[in-house]
Each structure stands twice: as structure tokens, then as C-alpha cells.
């Protein structure tokens, strides 16, 4: 199409940002930015029954958090506004009337009762309901008379009775549908509001949208949109239908079945950069099978040719892994800032140096919400089994552990400076004097300090974070605990 690339994201404000919706927005953003084009946000709120208060603000917030900054939209304006469909009602009514004149639509005066009966009859025949075209047979005189009488009406699309409608999709290629399979859908409802099928075509044309990106469930319905464009004599946009996102069990990912939204993942402690990176890969592959991309890198690498026709499987474990990679790439200060709210949920002590703690925790964190469970031993030792002191790999048993803890306690008590290097030098000098393996000394100390099978950091790291007084107290408790279990 002539002119710059213009893409749009047109969500309905129905509550929250679904992962599939965010992926559509991402692809539209990438395609526009890659071609120095414009990315537009449009709110499709014609279905007032599904409208949820506050949902528009959720859309604004989510796109901005994800870095998908739009060039035009309801809250920032633009040359093609208004960008909220409920504010464009007169445009739809004007174009619906024009479409009737052009023969692409017609007035339908059928009552709700008649339509309900037609639906029930179709259900009894186990057929998909299609309007029978009764009002398409009305004479011009009868239509004028009924309009003059103020009879309620809707406007339906006039679908050719025979033949086929074809179009080209940028992912799936040539698509052809028999016109007999296309229902003559409602374009303008009795309340004057348009349906999605009509409003998005009018808006895409009036806003100069060059590429329409949406889910492949619309593949067989797009011929209806094509017929609308052709009835008006308008140039059609390029269509880019993307594959469905499915769960590992093969079912479609859907907000109606409670699948996670962007907010759900963010509130669980996933980084926005990781979420965006992961959803980009749900149906798209780079040429070199690379997996980790910053948004700017996605903009350079993205191509329609990389979009897959096959369903994309949403793998929570893969997202978790990717999030861990992003967390480990953070600067220590960045991670510490993100971790603080989670530390505060689990740690009441005020003498803990969070930066020192973050050096240990960052390496073990995949999701920020994991942090409280990682550091839950800081305030108080959990109850643990004495068997934790037994480790074949470290060549420790209860006797070895006891023989290590006692001299370690004596030497650490003498330390004046409680810095990492001082603790390290003291313990390693003792290891050499006792002729022990490193693990035979450090494993029992780590166990006594954490009471956990695994911990963020080893014995020296934990001792530094906990401080001298608490370290010595826990080692003493470890000695008493082991002795209580070994006394015959």
C-alpha cells in the first residue's frame, strides 16, 4: 500500500490485558517501528455489555509498562481521532447508510422474536445459524414506508448469493471462502452502535491502517471484511493472521477460562522485559533461533516471514527460565530495588545489609515472588532434620560435622572484623590445620546457619549477611542439636 506503514492495536475494554492480546499489540508495534511507521491504539468499546470500568486505564498502563509506546491514541491524540469507537457513532451511521446505497448492505426489520425462532430451528437441525435474507427481498417502496413509520431496524451486510471471495494473507497465503458460508451479519445495531465487523473496517480505512494483525480465528471471516472494502471501493489493508496460543494440554489460551493476564505475571514477579521477550516467541522465530531479545533488538529482528502457522504452546517453565535470565542480567542495584518489597515480607530484622543479601539471592531467583521463600531463614531458623548435616558428596556425617563446628565456633569468636575475607581466611586456615576437605567444614556451617537443604550462598556468605552474633548463636545451636541426637 502507498504511504507509511500504519498498524493498530484495537482491544476491547473488558477487564485486563490477556497474553494473546499483548502479543498482537507487540507484533503490530514491531512491524510499524521496523518500517519507520506509526503504531496506533484504538479502543473498541461498541459492546457496552462487556465494558468494564477501569479497563481502558489497564490497557494504557500495560502498553506503557511493556514499552509499546503508541504514536496515536485516545489519551495522546492524533490526526485520525477520536480513537474510541463509542465517540465515532455518527461516522458509522453515515457509512452504513452509504453502504446501503451502494448495495453492500440492507435494512432488516425482523423482530428479535423471529430471529430467536430462526436460531432455535437451526439448533434443532444442528446447523450454524445464518439469517435467511428475508428483508433483503423487500421492495424499495416497502423499505421507505417502514422507515417513515419509524419501524425499528438494523443494517445487515449484503453477501453475494453465489461464488467465492478470496484474499491474500501475509502468513497463510491465498484464502478462499464460499460466499454461501458467510452469514449476512449485523453491521449497525438498532441502538445505532456498530458491530465489531463493521466498525473495525470503517476505522481501519479512515485511519489509513496498512496492516491488520489479528488471530487466525478470523481467517474464514475476513472475506466479509474484504467485501465491505470492495463495496465501498476502498483499497484493502494487508492481512497478517497469527497462530493461536495454546496451553500445554492443547486447549486455547483464553481469558474466559481464567488463563493468566499480563498483570497476573507481573504481580507474581516476572519482569516486563522477560514477558515481552517470551510472548514475541509465541508464534515467531528469528532466523538464527536466538531466544533473548531486548525490545530494540526485537524491532530489528522481527519479520512477518518468521511467523508460524502452527499453534504456539505457552510454557510457564520456559517463561520462568527466561525471567531468571533477565534477573541475572540486572545490575545489582536494580535487582536490590526490585527485591526490597519481597525482603520486607519475610525479614523483620533491621540490621541486614540488603545489598550483600542481593548478591546471593540474585543468582538463585527466577521469579521475584520466590524471594520470601529463599530468605525465610534470615529472621529465624526453620525447624530442620539433623540428617541435613549428612552429605555424601561433602563427605560429612554427624561426627565430622560436630568436629568441624566446634573449632569453627572457637576461631570465629576471636574475630574482631566480620568481613567476608576475614571469615574466609579464618575458616580456610582451620581447614588446613585440621586436614579437612573444604566441604567437611563449610557444609556443616552452612547447614547450621540456614537450616535448609539449599540456601543463597555458602557458609561464608551467610555468616557475613547474618552478622557475627547471630552466626555464633546458630553454630552453637547446631552443636547442641547434633549432640542431642548422638548421645546414646
Image (cartoon, helix red, strand yellow):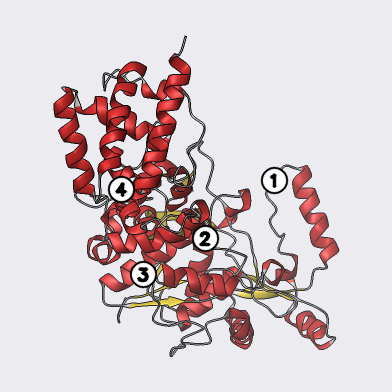
Distance between mark 3 and mark 4 Cα atoms: 47 Å
In this rendered view, identify the residue nearer to me: 200 or 282.
Answer: 282
Marks 1 and 4, the one that precedes in the sequence: 1
Label 4: few (<14), some or many (≥20) within 10 Å? many
Extreme residue toward the top, this view: 488
Q: Residue at x 34, y 22 (%)?
A: 402
- Residue 455 is situated, as x and y percent measured from the top left of the image, at 37, 38
Q: Residue 79's spot in the image, x, y percent?
A: 43, 90
SS at mark 3? helix
Instruction: Give coordinates of residue 431: x percent, y percent.
Output: 18, 29
CA separation in Å, label 3 and label 2:
20 Å
Q: Is residue 248 left or right of residue 400?
A: right
* Distance of label 1 from label 2 (alpha carbons): 39 Å
Q: State the CA–CA distance, disc 4 to disc 2.
A: 37 Å
Q: CA distance from mark 1 to mark 4?
A: 73 Å
Quarter of the N terminus within the rendering: bottom left
The residue identified by callout 1 is 127
Q: Where, by quadrant of the figure, is residue 175 drawn?
A: bottom left
* Residue underneath mark 2: 263
Q: Secondary structure at mark 4?
A: helix
> From the viewer's perspective, is 466 left or right of 165?
left
**Foreground disc of the pair 4, 2:** 4
Location of mark 4 (residue): 464
Query: Circle 3 is placed at which residue position?
Result: 29
As rendered, which of 100 and 363 lies closer to the eye? 363
Q: Nearer the viewer, mark 3 or mark 4?
A: 4
Q: Nearer the viewer, mark 3 or mark 2?
A: 2
Residue at point 59%, 58% (across, down): 182
**In the image shown, does 412 or 355 lie closer to the viewer?**
412
Amino acid at each position: 500500500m502507498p504511504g507509511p506503514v500504519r498498524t493498530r492495536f484495537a482491544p476491547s475494554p473488558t477487564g485486563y490485558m490477556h497474553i494473546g492480546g499483548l502479543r498482537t499489540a507487540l507484533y503490530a508495534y514491531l512491524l510499524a517501528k521496523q518500517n519507520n511507521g506509526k503504531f496506533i491504539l484504538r479502543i473498541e468499546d461498541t459492546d457496552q455489555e462487556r465494558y468494564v470500568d477501569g479497563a481502558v486505564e489497564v490497557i494504557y498502563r500495560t502498553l506503557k509498562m511493556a514499552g509499546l509506546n503508541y504514536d496515536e491514541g485516545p489519551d495522546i491524540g492524533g490526526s485520525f481521532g477520536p480513537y474510541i469507537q463509542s465517540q465515532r457513532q455518527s461516522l458509522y451511521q453515515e457509512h452504513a447508510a452509504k453502504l446501503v446505497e451502494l448495495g453492500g448492505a440492507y435494512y432488516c426489520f425482523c423482530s428479535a422474536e423471529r430471529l430467536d425462532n430462526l436460531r432455535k430451528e437451526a439448533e434443532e437441525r444442528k446447523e450454524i445459524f445464518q439469517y435467511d435474507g428475508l428483508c433483503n427481498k423487500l421492495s424499495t417502496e416497502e423499505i421507505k414506508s417502514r422507515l417513515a413509520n419509524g419501524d425499528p431496524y438494523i443494517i445487515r451486510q449484503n453477501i453475494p448469493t453465489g461464488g467465492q471471495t478470496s484474499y491474500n494473507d501475509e502468513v497463510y497465503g491465498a484464502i478462499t471462502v464460499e460466499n454461501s458460508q458467510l452469514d449476512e451479519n449485523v453491521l449497525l445495531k438498532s441502538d445505532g452502535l456498530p458491530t465489531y465487523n463493521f466498525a473495525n473496517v470503517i476505522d481501519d480505512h479512515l485511519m489509513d491502517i496498512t496492516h491488520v494483525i489479528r488471530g487466525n480465528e478470523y481467517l474464514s471471516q475476513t472475506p466479509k471484511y474484504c467485501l465491505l472494502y470492495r463495496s465501498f471501493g476502498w483499497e484493502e489493508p494487508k492481512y497478517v493472521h497469527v497462530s493461536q496460543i495454546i496451553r500445554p494440554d492443547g486447549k486455547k489460551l483464553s481469558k474466559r477460562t481464567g488463563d493468566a493476564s499480563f498483570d497476573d505475571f507481573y504481580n507474581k514477579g516476572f519482569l516486563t522485559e522477560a514477558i515481552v521477550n517470551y510472548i514475541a516467541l509465541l508464534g515467531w522465530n528469528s532466523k538464527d533461533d536466538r531466544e533473548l531479545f531486548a525490545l530494540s533488538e526485537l524491532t530489528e529482528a522481527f519479520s512477518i516471514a518468521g511467523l508460524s502457522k502452527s499453534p504456539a504452546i505457552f510454557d510457564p517453565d520456559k517463561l520462568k527460565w527466561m525471567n531468571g535470565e533477565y534477573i541475572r542480567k540486572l545490575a545489582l542495584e536494580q535487582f536490590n530495588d526490585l527485591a526490597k518489597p519481597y525482603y520486607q515480607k519475610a525479614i523483620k530484622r533491621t540490621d541486614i545489609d540488603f545489598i550483600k543479601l542481593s548478591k546471593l539471592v540474585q543468582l538463585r531467583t527466577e521469579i521475584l515472588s520466590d524471594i520470601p521463600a529463599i530468605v525465610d531463614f534470615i529472621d529465624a531458623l526453620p525447624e530442620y532434620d539433623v540428617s541435613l548435616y549428612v552429605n555424601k558428596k561433602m563427605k560429612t556425617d554427624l561426627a565430622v560435622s560436630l568436629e568441624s563446628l566446634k573449632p569453627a565456633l572457637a576461631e570465629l569468636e576471636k574475630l574482631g572484623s566480620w568481613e567476608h575475607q576475614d571469615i574466609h581466611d579464618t575458616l580456610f586456615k582451620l581447614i588446613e590445620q585440621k586436614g579437612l576437605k573444604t566441604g567437611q567444614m563449610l557444609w556443616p556451617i552452612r547447614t547450621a546457619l540456614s537450616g535448609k537443604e539449599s540456601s543463597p550462598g555458602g557458609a561464608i556468605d551467610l555468616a557475613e549477611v547474618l552478622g557475627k552474633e547471630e552466626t555464633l548463636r546458630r553454630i552453637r545451636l547446631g552443636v547442641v542439636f547434633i549432640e542431642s541426637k548422638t548421645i546414646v
